[in-house]
Image (cartoon, helix red, strand yellow):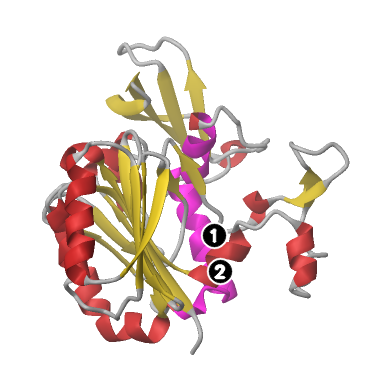
């Protein structure tokens, strides 16, 4: 089995502590060969030792400045990045190691979210993540991978270039203000994430393999049982439905000021000054069973009003009315 698995966790910088990363490092999932550290526009590479890695990690976090610290060997990487507002922990490793240590990895992630230090996390097959987010047709050609069945759109960068419209892919992602918006095999959502996607929308998704609330109120969602079965039609449909039910793309596009091209939406976001002092309204269109449906077929609508402060959405009102 040659698959690589990717894990990424996004943290609020206010809660960053060396112990968060040290605990995962101490799982001893594999051996490393080198350390690469970048800070203050200077990059240095060192031979890996556990002591040196922890020392550099401590010093980097204490400075409160941006940095990148990576330990690696040819098959996998362990990387910590701090930017202005958020920090990122990402790791790629062979699938056989992941399956062997899955319970330990899940326990570690659950513990992070139960301690309210993380905003969002996800686990995905690296290859699938690569192709679900690939726009360039030249890359498809280089790998002899067909793309004639995919919708092409005009490139926003180059006038005469056509690119793949990744919006059609169930597993595509958006990164907005450092935060991940997407749909994949395993996902964790912390309380801070509910400022963008309300917990009630995530909790309402019933078509996946697992949707559980952790002790802290954070949620863990598994869309299907086997991470390697991402390309099965039924699993792609589950991925796509999760996007629809949660309004994942609608919110991401709104944050990017890029409205989705949808003439009969299941979710709409409106801007203005509203009844309870909010400046945004999210409308979710529902059928008789309160399942989401296209606006033209809806019999009722859930109207959620938000107050937006520093790009964070706080619910101030929520109601369901018949149409």
Q: Secondary structure at mark 2?
A: helix
Q: Position of residue 69 (x, y in %)?
A: 33, 55
Quarter of the rendering containing residue 196 = top left
**Residue in view at x 88 percent, y 41 percent:** 160
Give the vertical position of 301 relative to 37 (above or below): above
**Residue in view at x 45 percent, y 55 percent:** 242
Does residue 186 appear anywhere in the picture? no
Q: Secondary structure at mark 1?
A: loop
In this figure, which residue is indicated by the disc labeled 1? 171
Quarter of the rendering containing residue 206 = bottom left
Report the label total.
2
Neighbor class of circle 2 (other Cα within 10 Å; few <14, some 14-19, many 20+) is some
Give the vertical position of 254 relative to 66 (above or below): above
Magenta segment boundaries in residue numbering: 228-254
**Residue in view at x 34 percent, y 34 percent:** 84
In this figure, which residue is indicated by the disc labeled 2? 128
Quarter of the rendering containing residue 306 = top left
Work out which residue is located at the far right of the displayed protein and give it.
160
Neighbor class of circle 1 (other Cα within 10 Å; few <14, some 14-19, many 20+) is many
199 vs 108, nearest the viewer:
108
Does residue 114 appear anywhere in the picture? yes
Q: Position of residue 6 (x, y in %)?
A: 42, 67
């Amino acid at each position: 089995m040659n698959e690589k698995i990717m894990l990424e966790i996004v943290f609020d910088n206010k809660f960053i502590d060396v112990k968060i990363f040290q605990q995962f490092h101490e799982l001893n999932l594999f051996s490393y060969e080198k350390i690469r550290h970048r800070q203050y526009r200077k990059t240095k590479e060192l031979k890996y030792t556990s002591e040196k890695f922890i020392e550099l990690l401590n010093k980097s976090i204490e400075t409160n400045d941006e940095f990148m610290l990576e330990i690696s060997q040819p098959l996998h990487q362990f990387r910590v990045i701090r930017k202005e507002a958020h920090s990122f922990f990402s790791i790629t490793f062979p699938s056989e190691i992941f399956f062997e240590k899955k319970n330990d990895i899940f326990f570690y992630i659950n513990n992070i979210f139960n301690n309210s230090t993380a905003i969002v996390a996800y686990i995905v097959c690296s290859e699938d993540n690569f192709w679900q987010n690939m726009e360039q047709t030249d890359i498809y050609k280089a790998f002899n991978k067909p793309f004639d069945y995919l919708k092409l759109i005009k490139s926003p960068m180059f006038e005469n270039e056509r690119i793949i419209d990744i919006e059609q892919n169930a597993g595509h992602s958006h990164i907005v203000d450092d935060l991940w918006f997407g749909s994949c095999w395993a996902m964790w959502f912390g309380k801070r994430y509910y400022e963008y996607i309300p917990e009630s929308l995530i909790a309402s998704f019933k078509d996946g393999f697992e949707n559980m609330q952790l002790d802290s109120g954070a949620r863990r969602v598994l869309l299907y049982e086997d991470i390697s079965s991402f390309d099965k039609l039924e699993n792609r449909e589950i991925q796509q439905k999760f996007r629809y039910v949660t309004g994942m793309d609608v919110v991401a596009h709104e944050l990017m000021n890029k409205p989705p091209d949808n003439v009969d939406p299941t979710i709409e976001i409106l801007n203005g000054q509203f009844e309870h002092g909010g400046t945004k309204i999210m409308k979710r269109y529902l059928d008789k069973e309160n399942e989401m449906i296209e606006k033209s077929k809806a019999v009722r609508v859930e109207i959620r009003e938000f107050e937006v402060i520093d790009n964070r959405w706080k619910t101030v009102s929520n109601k369901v009315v018949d149409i």
